[in-house]
Amino acid sequence: MAKNFCNDLDAVSFVKAFKKECEGVATRLNVPIENILGLAAQESQYGKGRIARDLKNYFSMHAPAAFQIGSEHPQENRKIKVAKFSRFRDCAESFEKQFGHAVKGKADPLVFAQALVAVRFNTGRAEDGGRANFIPYLVGIIGAVKGRLSC
């Protein structure tokens, strides 16, 4: 039985809210929009995460980052600082500037995710600050976002 990705109204709202903001980045990087939107959805918990809500940082960009307007330590982690942005677009373009070279032309979600691990956007290992199983998790979210684009 196929999943109905349209049932999660919060996730559909996130996709609709930021689709236009991701189009330019996706076009310039020659990747499907769901790759960029999926990464933002994964990193920000579909916009519900504190760093996304409070800092407009939907890609978990560390400071210093292009276009940031400030920075702060994440809760309970004094070792790093994350960037603060004024809007989603600035955060997306900051991601493009820092990591775009690694994912440019990588349309396949698996290859896209592997490229992000290769440049240490996320290590894929919880023991060093990454997300365990980052690659399959991101691939799944990209697939869900692709489904939600038609809702």
Image: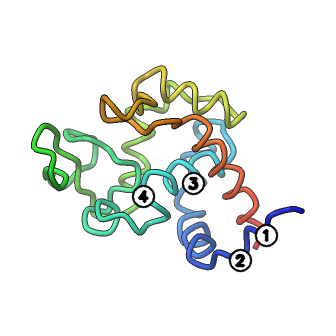
Q: How many marks?
A: 4
* Label at residue 4: 1
Find disc 4 in the rendering and name its residue. 44
* Label 3–label 2 contact, CB within 8 A: no
Please indicate whether residue 16 sits to the left or right of residue 3 in the image: left
Quadrant containing the C terminus in the rendered view: bottom right
Please indicate whether residue 20 sits to the left or right of residue 60 in the image: right
Residue lying at the far left of the rendered structure: 78
Looking at numbered disc 3 in the image, what kind of residue is underneath it? Answer: Leu
Q: Earlier in the sequence, mark 4 or mark 2?
A: 2
Q: Please tell me whether mark 2 sits on a helix, a strand or a loop.
A: helix
* Label 1–label 2 contact, CB within 8 A: yes
Mark 4 or 2, which is nearer the eye?
2
Find disc 2 in the rendering and name its residue. 7
Above or below 80: residue 85: below
| Residue 76 place in picture, x, y as percent | 15, 51
Q: Please tell me whether mark 3 sits on a helix, a strand or a loop.
A: helix
Query: Could you tell me how far apart the alpha carbons at marks 1 and 2 are, in whole angstroms?
Result: 6 Å
Q: Earlier in the sequence, mark 3 or mark 4?
A: 3
Query: Could you tell me how far apart the alpha carbons at marks 4 and 1 are, in whole angstroms?
Result: 22 Å
Find disc 3 in the rendering and name its residue. 37
What residue appears at the point 66 percent right and 47 percent down from the top-left corner? Answer: 140
| Residue 51 place in picture, x, y as percent | 29, 59
Q: Please tell me whether mark 1 sits on a helix, a strand or a loop.
A: loop
Looking at numbered disc 2 in the image, what kind of residue is underneath it? Answer: Asn
Looking at numbered disc 1 in the image, what kind of residue is underneath it? Answer: Asn
What residue appears at the point 43 percent right and 39 percent down from the top-left corner? Answer: 131
What residue appears at the point 41 percent right and 30 percent down from the top-left corner? Answer: 125
| Residue 121 place in picture, x, y as percent | 40, 32
